[in-house]
Image (tube, grey):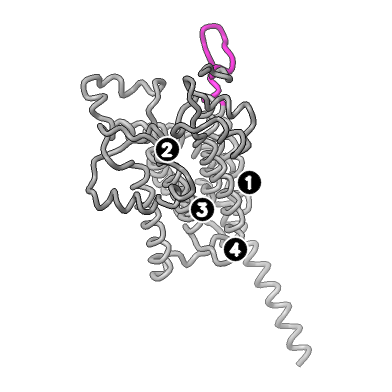
Amino acid sequence: MGTLLLDPIAFSIGSLSVHWYGLILGSAAIVGLLLAIQEGKRFGIPSDFFMDLLLLGVPSAIIGARIYYVAFTWDDYKDNFWDVFKIWNGGIAIYGALIGAIICAFFYFRHKGYNFWRIVDICAPSLIIGQAIGRWGNFVNQEAYGGPVEESFLRNTLHLPDFIVNQMNVQGTFHHPTFLYESLWNIVGLILLLVLRRQKFMRAGELFLSYFIWYSIGRFFIEALRTDSLGFQGPEWLASIVNALWSPMTAMGFELGYLDPAYGNLRISQVLSILIIIVAIILIVVRRITGASKERYMDPIVSSKTPTDGGSDNVSELERKKDRRDESSSIGSGTDQKKE
């Protein structure tokens, strides 16, 4: 009982051990990259652009994830500052990773001359599929799980295969496979984003904001099941709102995961999820009203930089399309004159 079914170490080369967690995260990054490259081709954006973005974005995401985690657990590090840099001991947060990656992306897109909202729309499906795959790294490490449950719940109610059920047995106690809940939620979100991006009503930035809304809804409900949440001491009125919003889960028979009283009475990720959903909806509405999102998702994407900076392909393609439209228009006009 409590013995790992899966060895977290995939293989070793001499004294170097390669962990499944790293391989899974690497695979998630590659799948996300390929997805972005494929969609970028529709807009004439070179693959090198996304490859460079990945090379810059991954370190930025790791730094952001670590800073976020340390900031909310500073008491654990203030007397051991060098432990801040020991990320191999655990302690990163997905929202921090997103913040770090977005900050990096903003300056990178600006350097390349691309509109921020247009490119993050392309990257949105990559982000959510990366998270869906990455959660399986938590599964292998037996981390980021939920509160205790009966084995029968996993086998008979959820009908999970043995390899998942056994891995959710941590030191003799079975737990909610919250990694699986979030992974499946993100896969559904990926399908939703892939459908939405082909709809004519989608404006610039709205696919990216839709990603945040979808992910945050799932994260709000799943986070409360976990036993490793970062927390803070907040006002009782806010705690009451959070509990009321989560109450449908209680009605379905789910119980809150343990939250260390030393951290506080509110889970940071839950509160942040609510704020993100509100801000994303407001941004969509305001950008539509003000005309900031007048461009549609399927409109051409052009770099404002010189041709040597990667904008030439886009500009040339746009010019060719314009010429074809003008030619067609001229032919059409001539035909109409003959008919008259």
> At which x and y percent is residue 212?
45, 51
Q: Secondary structure at mark 3?
A: helix
> What amino acid type should be assigned to the residue bearing mark 4?
Gln
Q: CA distance from mark 4 to mark 3?
A: 13 Å
Q: Which residue is mark 4?
A: 199
> What amino acid type should be assigned to the residue bearing mark 2?
Ile
Q: Quadrant of the C terminus?
A: bottom right
Q: Which residue is mark 1?
A: 38
- Sort mark 1 into few (<14), some (14-19) or many (20+) by Cα contacts within 10 Å: some
Q: Which residue is mark 3?
A: 121
Answer above or below: position of 2 versus 294. Answer: above
Q: CA distance from mark 3 to mark 2?
A: 19 Å
- Sort mark 3 into few (<14), some (14-19) or many (20+) by Cα contacts within 10 Å: many
Tell me, yes or no, whether the highlighted magenta stretch contains residue 19.
yes
Q: Nearer the viewer, residue 301 or 10?
A: 10
> At which x and y percent is residue 89?
39, 20
Task: Check if mark 3's residue and mark 2's residue have beta carbons within 8 Å.
Answer: no
Of callouts 1 and 4, the N-terminal one: 1
> What amino acid type should be assigned to the residue bearing mark 3?
Asp
Q: Secondary structure at mark 1?
A: helix
Of callouts 1 and 2, the N-terminal one: 1
Q: CA distance from mark 3 to mark 1?
A: 13 Å
Q: Nearer the viewer, residue 60 or 323?
A: 60
Task: Check if mark 3's residue and mark 1's residue have beta carbons within 8 Å.
Answer: no
Tell me, yes or no, whether the highlighted magenta stretch contains residue 24.
no
Answer above or below: position of 64 versus 239. Answer: above
Q: Which residues are magenta?
A: 8-23
Q: Is residue 257 left or right of residue 306?
A: left
